[in-house]
Image: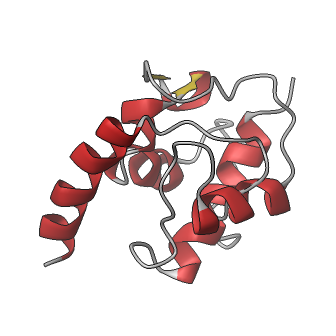
Amino acid sequence: MKKLILFLIVPAAILAGCGGSDDGGSSDSSTATPDSGGTNAAAIELFDSSGCAGCHTLSEADAEGPLGPELDGTNLSVDQVRSQIENGGGSMPAFKDELTPQQIDQLAEFVSQASQS
């Protein structure tokens, strides 16, 4: 069922433009801490499987999405990313009903860390 929901959300997010302001997001802090290699495979997988990579460019996730704002160098806070993921904004849809609070926290921490200059 979750895969079906994501399958339906990703195309909708792409059609919606996945853009938005730089004021939100969320992720699971227990799994979003970078490992010794400086990356977090679980957070990168979630970034990809949730549709983020289909819209956003983020070097650490090897994502080159053509629709949403580029996230590299935006220096977003965890709270900014969490809010954006939960509530959407601009042309980005809200994901608070699509992702668990833990997934939102995981994405927020990962994107915040990866967006730092």
Residue 40 higher or lower than 24, as above or below: above
Instruction: From the top left corner, tell me how far across and down residue 58 is, in percent.
Output: 58, 27
Q: Residue at x 51, y 63 (%)?
A: 94
From this viewpoint, is residue 35 visible?
A: no
The quarter of the image holding the C terminus is: top right
Q: Residue at x 67, y 64 (%)?
A: 26
Q: How many marks?
A: 0
Instruction: From the top left corner, tell me how far across and down residue 84 is, in percent.
Output: 67, 56
- Horizontal side, residue 96 vs residue 55: left or right: right
Q: Residue at x 63, y 23 (%)?
A: 70
Instruction: From the top left corner, tell me how far across and down residue 44 is, in percent.
Output: 48, 44
Q: Residue at x 66, y 50 (%)?
A: 110
* Residue sitting nearer the eye, 31 or 16: 16
- Horizontal side, residue 108 vs residue 74: left or right: left
- Horizontal side, residue 37 vs residue 18: left or right: right
- Horizontal side, residue 25 vs residue 94: left or right: right
The quarter of the image holding the N terminus is: bottom left
* Residue sitting nearer the eye, 38 or 23: 23
